[in-house]
Amino acid sequence: MNEMVENREWVHQVLAGSPAAEEIKQPDWLKAYRDKARDGLATVAMPHRKQELWRYTSTEKLFGQTFRPAAKARVELDDDLVRDLFTEGLDAYRLVFVNGHCSPPYCVIHGLPAGVQVGSLNAISKMDEELVSPWLGQVENQDSRLFGLLNNAMMQDGLFLHVDAGVKLDKPIEVFYVGHVSDASILTQPRGLVVLEQGAEATLIEHFVGESGALYFNNNQTEIVTQEHAHLTHYRVQDESEAAFHMASLHVLQDASSHYDFMMFSLGASWARTEINTRYAGEHAETRLKGLYLVGDQQMNDIHLDIVHNLPSCHSEETFKGLLYGKGRAVFDGRIEVVKDAQKTEAHLSNDNLMLTRGAEVDTKPQLEIYADDVQCSHGTTVGQIEDDQLFYLRSRGIDEHHARTMLSLGFAGEIVDSVADEFLKTRLMRSIEARLNASLADE
């Protein structure tokens, strides 16, 4: 049996372990959506290294594992674990999803302003079908991609956020996706849907975490719509279990003069891949994407950007940095396309990587495809090590090599971390990054 056949059998086993469509209580439109995805899975191309999208990333490790869909049964979390989840000092509305399902006892969403709907996508789609059905599946385009179709066919639950026109959310929404494994390796498939109507504003903070050593596969997908003059600030912190697999797909559609500010921090998981896709539905929209990834021993981290400037006068900036140590491996594949009629586009892409050990590896491929002639665009990448002169300067002032290397690494990461507006979240991130660097450099 060749690898492609074995991988397709993996998909069949996953689907066989999920409830049949007729066994799930769901409206007709959602059943049709799921059925279409299941049909697509029968013929979708399996990821392999000869495909450009998977050229640098092997799926052998993922498909070598056996996962079963997570049961809906409520999982009780330790009180100390729940307290440790929340960002200390941060005043926020909070939702907690365990193994892909909402856990109401741990959610705090009381006192929401008028015009804001926040909660479980599964629950709200049953209570108010007309609020969800016009949007779900309208932004993502995964007809030819395995993991998108798998999420469409088997989505469990996830965040639903809808903000009415002109409403400004008074405090952030902090969402936690927790991987909790008791006796088997599980597959969780959260689905997020975020809609900001005209002139609305909100801040969303997402955390993906898991118990230490827990083996699971988090295949999550999120659709985001920002209508005219809306502004979404979106933080995403991937800090999964060191044994976990993480696949994330974000699909963003921006209307005229809207703003989408996104910052991702990819720290955990054994195997992680994040795909970010943005399109425009109106002119003068602005997109700012920033990211930091830390990759160490037994870790592979893959980031793909697909930014299509399909309308004139839109602006995008993408800035990503990587810190690699041990035998960690990273992939950065950033693509910006400016179509023929997208004049007055401004787009800039950069990727910088700091290699802390000789055993670390990165494949970086920033791309610009420009078919318009009145544009301002740039792209670039760097891969380097800590400079001896910088290290010598700190050592000459009595700082030992371990702390000197940590300080220089934190300084490299600072451009991304300092972009975090909330001081409590910034402190949490810096502590986590520093702890990982200290542990990794101590082992060298």
Image: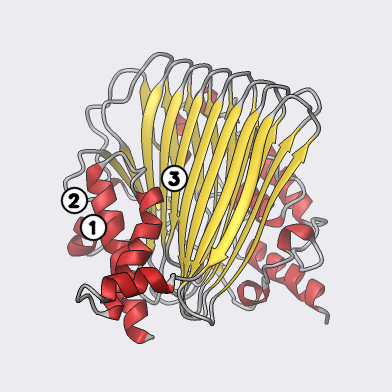
Mark linked to residue 88: 2
Question: Which circle's residue, 2 or 1, is located before the other in the chain?
Answer: 1
Which amino acid, mark 3? Met
Q: CA distance from mark 3 to mark 2?
A: 19 Å
Which amino acid, mark 2? Glu
* Number of dots carrying numbers: 3
Locate residue 281, reporting x and y percent: 65, 22
Mark linked to residue 82: 1
Which amino acid, mark 1? Val
Measuring 43% from the left and 41% from the top, which residue is drawn there?
159
In the rendered view, tell whether residue 256 sits above or below residue 358: above
Crowding near the residue tagged with mark 2, few <14, some 14–19, many ≥20 C-alpha atoms within 10 Å: few
Q: Secondary structure at mark 3?
A: strand
Q: Quadrant of residue 284?
A: top right
Crowding near the residue tagged with mark 1, few <14, some 14–19, many ≥20 C-alpha atoms within 10 Å: few
The quadrant in which the N terminus is found is bottom right
Q: Are marks 2 and 1 in contact (CB under 8 Å)?
A: no
Q: Nearer the viewer, mark 3 or mark 1?
A: 3
Q: What is the basis of the colouring in this image?
A: secondary structure
Q: Nearer the viewer, mark 2 or mark 1?
A: 2
Mark linked to residue 263: 3
Do we see residue 321 in this rendering? Answer: yes
Measuring 79% from the left and 28% from the top, which residue is drawn there?
372
